[in-house]
Amino acid sequence: MCTAVALALSELPDELVLAHDLGVRIHTRGGEKEVRFYWRAAPALLPVWWNGGLKVVKWGNWDRAERKLPPTGWTWQTTVEAGRWSAMEPEPVEILATYGLSNGVWFRVQQGMRGLLVRTRGGEPVVYMICEPSTRYFRVMTRAEWMPVLIGEVI
Amino acid sequence: MTAFVAHLDADCFYVSAERVRHPDLIDKAVGVLGNNGACVIAKSYEMKARGVKTGTPIWDAKALCPEGVYVKRDFYWYEVLSRKMLGIVGTFSPKVEYYSIDEFFFRAERLHPRQNLHQTATAIRDHILEAAGLPVTIGVARTRTLAKLFSDTGKPFGAVAVLERDHERELLATLPVTEISGIAGRRAARLAPYGIRSCLDLADADGRLVNRLLTKTGYEIWLELNGTPVTPIRPERPPHKALGRGGSLMGNVDQPVVLWAWAVRHVERLIEELNYHNVRTTALAVEVGWKTGGSTCGVVSIPTPTDRFDDLLDAARVALRRAFVPYATATHLHVLATELRRGKGFQLSLFDTPDPKKDAAAQAKAAVNARHGRFKVRSGVTLYLPAVYADPANNFDICDVRGKICF
């Protein structure tokens, strides 16, 4: 399971960094600053491309703040395809990431990951990472049984 | 006038190639993972500094270097850059040998009469970085062995020209004998009782002693260490004496049908090679590596030289049966064409007649795959390997990079 994504700080507008207090999530890797979005962080957030712009939205419902949403941050592609989310009027979004973290292994992401955006009763957007069974390569690499649905690439 | 040989070695080539298309990886600890995703096959200097070595399992690597980024290998891309680099070197030298995907030998010639060979090597190195984005190290010396040894001392991003014997001896004294390609632990152990530990010790040893201890290969290394060129620069790869395809089975295989599927996959890959080199084979060997250690091999002679799928399939079936160990778990399998004949002008046996239908079927298969992608048409037996064919990256391996001398 992918439990964090990292996005280069240069990709994020300053106003988003300030608005979501992302300064505490800035890390340096190889001299370059990046913002890490961990599932375990409070609040859990993810950067998504939505409605023609980069937004930072809540990742899943781990704090169970919304009773009608599943208390997790991931959903399976088969569930989405089966229409189990349709009652919530979900929107497909692209989760932006330079790197993903799965079982302690950082892997490079070329374009991004698929996400599903729904709204709480209060209208707040919440994104779920769409997952599929790991390819053999990804499973050996990370020992994870599930991997995010990557856009335009196979790991 | 002494002719000098240059050795070019790309610095952590696979990582550098990834950095060409993903500049965000520059200055970061990067590990490129092998065919199975289990081991690091190339690492950046940043990752190397954390103790990660080539061959380190990813589970050890991530503990040593938790901030490291791990990338799946892409030999298609590495070949593209390798050939680009080869083309660039070809503009500087009339004679270039494509030794391996990231190493070339070439005749070192001054670019300008007033320039020395060190300046030339520096200029070529800088031009490759500018034109291809790849950092390389170039060593220039009297022989291939010396050039290769000295380029290693210049890494990373170095340019070394060692043209005088005194300078050679000074550097050779600092290098352990195991730095020489072809002298590893066992051969080094044979040399140690005679006090031969450094490259200079070997160069100064009696040639007859070296010949006795290390046979002809070792003697040739000794000659090269002393400045006598033995192996010329080979712009063309010499014809193959045997062709093979195979490797890891991506895990443990204990079902005979899966083992057979792997054999058929490698037969299909082997046929592509036979066709490319315009050769046929009169012998097929299947070698299976077992989890308990050791390997077994089955060999089948084929009466008429062939590159046809049905003939080689029949031979592979018999060869695999000979190599098969019931209830054992296999981990590796190789299919080898060991006796190659030219593709045309061979003698048919009395009972073999040309079969235009099967030839046409083979041609149609090759044409479809050439147009729509490798393995688009393949044997149904390989359906037992869905994970292998689901990943397009498995369609191209390092051995599929043609024309290089070394693996």
Image (cartoon, coloured by chain):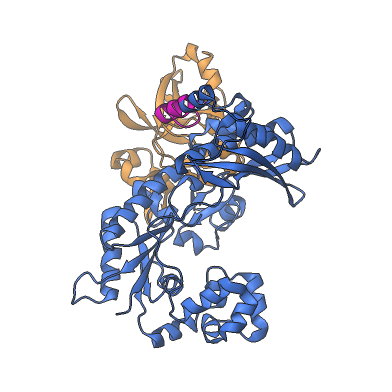
Asked whether B41 falls inside the magenta stretch, the response is no
Is B241 located above or below residue B117 in the figure?
above
Which chain did the renderer colour blue? B
Total marks drawn? 0
The chief SS type of the magenta part is helix
Which residue occupies the foreground of this view, A72 or A115? A115
Instruction: Determine which quarter of the picture holds residue B35.
Output: top right
Q: Is residue B101 visible?
A: yes
Between B260 and B67, which is closer to the camera in this rendering?
Answer: B260
- Say whether residue B368 is magenta: yes
Q: How far from the left and from the top, in percent, is residue B14?
A: 44, 52
User: Could you tell me which quadrant the N terminus of chain B lies in?
Assistant: bottom left
Q: Which residues are magenta?
A: B364-377
> Residue B80: horizontal and vertical position, in percent?
37, 46
Q: Which of B232/A59 is in front? A: B232
In the rendered image, residue A34, in percent from the top left (x then y), is placed at 39, 48
Task: Name which residue lies at 25% across and 67% down.
Answer: B123
